[in-house]
C-alpha cells in the first residue's frame, strides 16, 4: 500500500471521527431547540444532521473496501488509538440518538394529546345584539 493511500485513509478516518462528534453536537442543539420550542433552530439542526449523515455514509463506503481486500488489517488500516476514538464517539452518538428518539417520541405524544384536546372543543362565535356595533367574541363549550 502506498504512503498516499495510507494518508488518504487516515484523513478520511479523521474526517469520519470529526463528523461523528459534530453530529452529536447537532443532535444536542436539536434537543435544546425542542426543549425551548425554537422551530427555526430545530429545522436548521435537522438539515445539518442530514448533510452530516450523508457524508458519514460516503466516508464509510470509501473506508470499508480496504477491509474486504485485507481482513487481517484493522478496520481501514487505522491505528488502535484512532479506532478506539471512533468507537467511543460512535457509542456516545448511539446513546445520544436513543435520547433524541425518546424526546421526539415524547414530543409527538404531547402534540397528539394537545391536538386531541383542542379538537374536542368546538369554538363558536357569539355576537352582541342591540343597536350598538356587533362585537364578536370567541368561546368554548365544555
Image: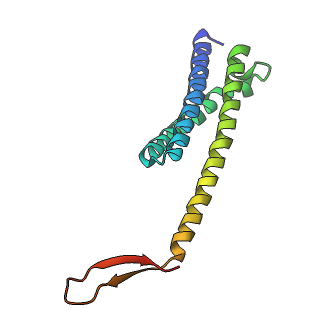
Place residue 55 in its image quadrant. Answer: top right
In this view of the protein, which residue sits in the foreground, 30 or 9? 30
The quadrant of the picture occupied by the N terminus is top right
From what the image shows, is residue 113 above or below residue 9?
A: below
Q: Residue at x 70, y 17 (%)?
A: 77
From what the image shows, is residue 31 above or below residue 76?
A: below
- Give the left or right position of residue 139, taking residue 24 as reference: left
Q: Is residue 79 visible?
A: no
In this view of the protein, which residue sits in the foreground, 5 or 79? 79
Place residue 97 in its image quadrant. Answer: top right
- Give the left or right position of residue 24, taking residue 48 as reference: right
The percent position of residue 107, horizontal first and vertical second, equals 59, 54
Q: Residue at x 75, y 22 (%)?
A: 70
The percent position of residue 139, horizontal first and vertical second, equals 42, 77
Q: Residue at x 73, y 25 (%)?
A: 67
- Give the left or right position of residue 37, taking residue 132 as reference: right
As drawn, which residue projects farthest toward the bottom?
A: 130
In this view of the protein, which residue sits in the foreground, 91 or 5? 91
From what the image shows, is residue 133 above or below residue 3?
A: below
In this view of the protein, which residue sits in the foreground, 89 or 111? 111
Q: Is residue 35 visible?
A: yes
The percent position of residue 122, horizontal first and vertical second, equals 48, 79
Amino acid at each position: 500500500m502506498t504512503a498516499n493511500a495510507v494518508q488518504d485513509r487516515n484523513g478520511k478516518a479523521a474526517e469520519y471521527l470529526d463528523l461523528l462528534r459534530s453530529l452529536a453536537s447537532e443532535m444536542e442543539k436539536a434537543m435544546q431547540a425542542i426543549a425551548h420550542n425554537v422551530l427555526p433552530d430545530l429545522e436548521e439542526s435537522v438539515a445539518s444532521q442530514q448533510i452530516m449523515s450523508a457524508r458519514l455514509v460516503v466516508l464509510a463506503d470509501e473506508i470499508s473496501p480496504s477491509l474486504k481486500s485485507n481482513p487481517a488489517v484493522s478496520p481501514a488500516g487505522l491505528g488502535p488509538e484512532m479506532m478506539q476514538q471512533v468507537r467511543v464517539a460512535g457509542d456516545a452518538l448511539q446513546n445520544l440518538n436513543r435520547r433524541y428518539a425518546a424526546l421526539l417520541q415524547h414530543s409527538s405524544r404531547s402534540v397528539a394529546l394537545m391536538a386531541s384536546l383542542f379538537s374536542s372543543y368546538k369554538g363558536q362565535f357569539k355576537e352582541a345584539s342591540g343597536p350598538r356595533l356587533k362585537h364578536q367574541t370567541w368561546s368554548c363549550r365544555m
